[in-house]
Amino acid sequence: SRYSQPKLELYGLYRALRHFRLYIIGVKVLHVEVDAKYIKGMLNEPDLQPNAAINRWIQGILLFDFELIHVPATKFKGPDALSRRELGKGEIIEPEDDSWLDEIALYAATPRSDYRDTQLAQVRHPYDVSHLPSSVTFAALVDQEATLSDIYHYLTTLQSPTFPSVNA
């Protein structure tokens, strides 16, 4: 094998999350049990120069919100045996398809800790807001504030906002 055992364990976690992604995206409380303590360290502090494949595995794993739980190998025999079994007659290994990572990679964002309100004051508008009627400016700000409030609520609670009914 091209990779060491810890890297293969990391790859196994990546493949498992990738396989079940349609079922676990958006799950609020997800516990992943592994028998390899070092996976947590590999995710938090990757090698100084990990190769591109390992970077993609880590990227794919970190897209999910989960808690990694270590279960000692003595209590974790079933999944380990399954990972080492031979392919059955007619079984094939599905080809690698990491294109889904490229499609959603740009949606990931981390909050900036160095953001200051003073930076907002430096933003230049493409128009002079002082020449707009105050009612238009106020209405636009109220609409934007409501939308931003809904977005903030969703991102902090992962609960869909309520939308007004179509008949209203």
Image (cartoon, grey):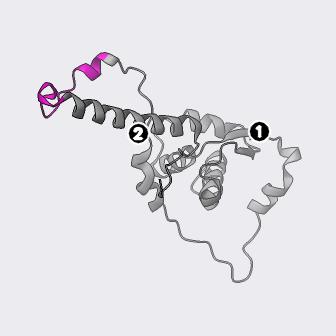
Residue 83 % position (x, y): 74, 60
Q: Residue furthest front?
A: 168
Q: Viewer-nearest of labels 2 and 1?
A: 2
- Please tell me which residue is depicted at 52% across the width and 66% down the height of the picture: 96
Amino acid type assigned to the residue bearing label 2 in the image: Thr
- Quadrant of the frame with the N terminus: bottom right
Q: Is residue 35 left or right of residue 54?
A: right
- Please tell me which residue is depicted at 58% across the width and 46% down the height of the picture: 64
Residue 113 against residue 147 in the figure, above or below: above
Q: Quadrant of residue 81?
A: bottom right
- At label 1, counting other C-alpha atoms closer than 10 Å, the crowd grade (few under 14, some 14-19, many 20 or more) is some
Q: Which residue is mark 1?
A: 70
Residue 46 visible within the image: no
Residue 10 % position (x, y): 62, 48
Marks 2 and 1, how far apart at CA:
41 Å
Residue 152 against residue 80 in the figure, above or below: above
Residue 147 % position (x, y): 40, 39
Q: Residue furthest bottom?
A: 90
Residue 141 visible within the image: yes
The answer to if 35 sits in the magenta stretch is: no
Task: Judge by depth and name the residue closer to the eye, 147 or 6.
Answer: 147
Q: Is residue 99 left or right of residue 8?
A: left
Amino acid type assigned to the residue bearing label 1 in the image: His
Task: Judge by depth and name the residue closer to the eye, 91 or 148.
Answer: 148
Residue 161 against residue 24 in the figure, above or below: above
Q: Which residue is mark 2?
A: 147
Q: Is residue 112 left or right of residue 65?
A: left
Q: Secondary structure at mark 2?
A: helix
Residue 29 % position (x, y): 70, 42
Q: Earlier in the sequence, mark 2 or mark 1?
A: 1
Segment tinted magenta in the rendering: 118-133
